[in-house]
Amino acid sequence: MRRRPMNAIPVRRRSTLTCALTLAAVAVLVPAKPAQAAVGCEVTYTTSSWSTGFVGNAQIRNLGDTWIAPTVQLTLTGNQQITSGWGYDLSQSGTQVIGHGFEWTRPIPTGETLSFGFSGTYTGVNTPPTDWRVNGVPCVLAGQPPAVVAEPTSLSIPEGLSGSFTVRLSHPPAEATSLRMTTRGTGLWASPPVLLTFNSTNWSTPQSFGVYSVQDPDTVDDVAVFTLAYPGYVSDTVTITQVDDD
Ligand SMILES: [Ca+2]
Ligand SMILES: [Ca+2]
């Protein structure tokens, strides 16, 4: 990770979490990123089940660039066993289901929908699958509002070392805008002068943001909360804990 130049982020030591500072003054420097196809998807899943069996239908709407036989994945949340599928070449391993498009699958441009279904057996409660992905990129569920997505949302950084998290958007933005970061908490933190900008091409590609945990004279594990805001999107937060070495 780049360590210089850094913007120091002093947070008053031993204060409460309401004693804040902001990162809003970070210098503007958009990191160069290679051009990359945007991947985005929105899932609508419907199911009907009876005592020991069920039928599930998935509609995955393309929010990004055109798909050509994309790989789809989903995670079953119970003991469901898929016994047959249609519309896509599905295979199951444990709770993981992966699907590959048939050779003759037509391209699916932005706004159009990929549809497939399956039937299977289960016992107990037939809860819907989670963690839907297309070409490895997580999908949003239909009806969910656009959101900032940070990963991980909590991490620990030893004092004197660096750590990082990634940020992306769940839906494509109407126009290019930069992410706004604010912090609150305690401790001494620093970050490179990088402003993360998302546009209609790179919105689904995670961008990395590094944070340096500055040596401090106390012996307390300080905690800072980074709030990541984007206009029109639900904000996300990342909680960073300093592992003090004194
Ligand atoms: Ca210390
Ligand atoms: Ca400390």
Image (tube, helix red, strand yellow):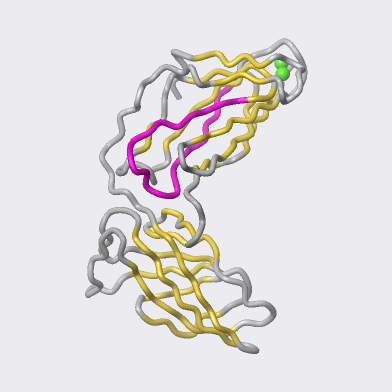
Query: Outermost residue, bottom direction?
Result: 51
In the rendered image, the quadrant that contains the C terminus is: top right
Of residues 57 and 164, which is closer to you in this image? Answer: 57
Displayed-image quarter of ligand 2: top right
Looking at the picture, does residue 165 appear above or below residue 27? below
Q: Reply yes or no: does residue 182 show up in magenta.
A: yes
Magenta segment range? 160-183
In the rendered image, the quadrant that contains the N terminus is: top left
Q: Position of residue 44 (x, y in %)?
A: 46, 68
Of residues 124 and 169, which is closer to you in this image? Answer: 169
Q: Position of residue 30 (x, y in %)?
A: 35, 26
Q: Position of residue 22 (x, y in %)?
A: 57, 20
Q: Is residue 152 left or right of residue 86?
A: right
The residue drawn where x is 44% and y is 42% is: 168
Q: Quadrant of residue 198?
A: top left
Query: Outermost residue, top direction?
Result: 217
Query: Outermost residue, front direction?
Result: 232
Q: Position of residue 138 (x, y in %)?
A: 46, 55
How many numbered discs, if any? 0
Q: Reply yes or no: does residue 16 show up in magenta.
A: no
Looking at the picture, does residue 208 appear above or below residue 58? above
Q: Is residue 92 left or right of residue 200?
A: right
Looking at the picture, does residue 119 appear above or below residue 205? below
The residue drawn where x is 41% and y is 70% is: 59
Q: Quadrant of residue 226?
A: top right
Q: Is residue 67 left or right of residue 217?
A: left
The residue drawn where x is 45% and y is 14% is: 4
Of residues 15 and 83, which is closer to you in this image? Answer: 15
